[in-house]
Each structure stands twice: as structure tokens, then as C-alpha cells.
Image (tube, rainbow, N blue to C red):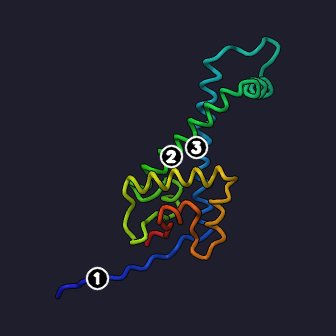
């Protein structure tokens, strides 16, 4: 007996799981960013003799706008790579995997590398728009953010 088509049903990810996965992914990137900042500050010039501790580090960082912009750019690239490779190779970022979620195309298939890259770039854009594009996922009926709508993807629970 041949089957011409099958119908597959996915359960969309609940808003709290999407938010928790996003928080987990942001935490991973934050740890990376803090470690990178620490390495850069440790390799740079020493703070004045009279200063030490968190206040001196914060004064140094505030005084170094170029350092902050460079670090922000590195974190954006890291987020892009994390999202692109995570969704293309595993179907989910580390945060989504921890919460039993994955990203699929409209047809329910895993994402290609190009669609995954487009979704990652759009997700960064959604985040940079004060997070409003990401917040759509929590309040739309389909549970999709702006980046999901534009990339043609869905975040679903792993069966």
C-alpha cells in the first residue's frame, strides 16, 4: 500500500517555554560576553594605583565607548552563529533544546542553513527593535515572533 501524503501535527511552543529558552540563550551569551570583557580588560592597561574593584572596572568600561561597541558587535556575531548553527544542525539552540523545543519550516521540516541564517539575522533585528519583534511570539495566536513570520518558521515542542 502506497501513501501519497501524511499529515503531521505539531504543538506550538508555550509562551513560557519560549521565554525561558530565550533567557537561557541570553545567559549563555552573557557569560561569553563577560568572559571576553574580563580578558580584554585584563590584557589592557592597569587601572590607577588608587583604584581597584568593580567601580574602577566600570569607570574603565564607561570611558571606553569603542570597547563597548566592539564587544556588542562580537556578541551580535556570536548570537548569529549560535542561532544559525543551532537551528540548522540540531533544530534548536541550546536554550530550546533544554526546554524541549525545536524550530521547523512551514512544512514541518528542519531548517536549511540559508533559512536558519535568515531567521537568526531577523531574530537579531527583532531584538534590536527594543525586543518588540520577539515579544510578538508571546502575544500572537500562532506564537510566532516577527522573525518567525518573515522566515516562515515555527517553534514547536519536541514530540
Q: CA distance from mark 1 to mark 2?
A: 35 Å
Q: Secondary structure at mark 3?
A: helix
Q: Nearer the viewer, residue 9 or 17?
A: 9
Q: Residue at x 78, y 20 (%)?
A: 52
Q: Residue at x 51, y 59 (%)?
A: 96
How packed is label 3: few (under 14 Cα within 10 Å), some, or many (20 or more)?
A: some
Residue 98: percent from left, percent from top: 51, 58
Q: Residue at x 62, y 68 (%)?
A: 15
Q: Which residue is mark 1?
A: 5
Where is the C terminus found, in terms of image quarters? bottom left
Q: Residue at x 61, y 55 (%)?
A: 126
Q: Residue furthest top?
A: 49
Q: Residue furthest bottom?
A: 1
Give the vertical position of 86 relative to 71 (above or below): below
How packed is label 2: few (under 14 Cα within 10 Å), some, or many (20 or more)?
A: many
Residue 122: percent from left, percent from top: 54, 54
**Residue 136 placement: quadrant:** bottom right
Give the vertical position of 66 relative to 122 (above or below): above
Which of disc 2 and disc 3 is earlier in sequence?
3
Q: CA distance from mark 1 to mark 3?
A: 41 Å
Q: Secondary structure at mark 1?
A: loop
Q: Secondary structure at mark 2?
A: helix
Q: Which residue is mark 3?
A: 29
Amino acid at each position: 500500500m502506497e501513501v501519497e501524503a501524511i499529515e503531521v501535527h505539531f504543538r506550538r511552543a508555550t509562551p513560557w517555554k519560549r521565554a525561558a529558552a530565550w533567557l537561557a540563550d541570553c545567559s549563555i551569551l552573557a557569560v561569553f560576553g563577560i568572559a571576553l570583557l574580563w580578558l580584554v580588560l585584563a590584557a589592557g592597561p592597569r587601572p590607577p594605583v588608587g583604584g581597584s574593584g568593580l567601580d574602577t572596572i566600570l569607570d574603565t568600561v564607561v570611558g571606553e565607548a569603542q570597547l563597548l561597541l566592539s564587544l556588542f558587535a562580537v556578541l551580535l556575531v556570536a548570537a548569529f552563529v549560535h542561532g544559525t548553527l543551532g537551528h540548522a544542525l540540531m533544530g534548536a539552540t541550546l536554550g530550546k533544546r533544554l526546554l524541549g523545543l525545536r524550530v521547523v519550516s512551514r512544512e514541518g521540516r528542519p531548517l536549511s542553513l540559508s533559512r536558519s541564517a535568515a531567521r537568526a539575522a531577523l531574530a537579531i533585528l527583532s531584538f534590536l527593535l527594543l525586543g518588540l519583534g520577539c515579544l510578538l511570539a508571546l502575544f500572537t495566536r500562532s506564537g510566532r515572533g516577527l522573525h518567525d513570520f518573515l522566515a516562515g518558521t515555527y517553534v514547536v515542542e519536541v514530540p
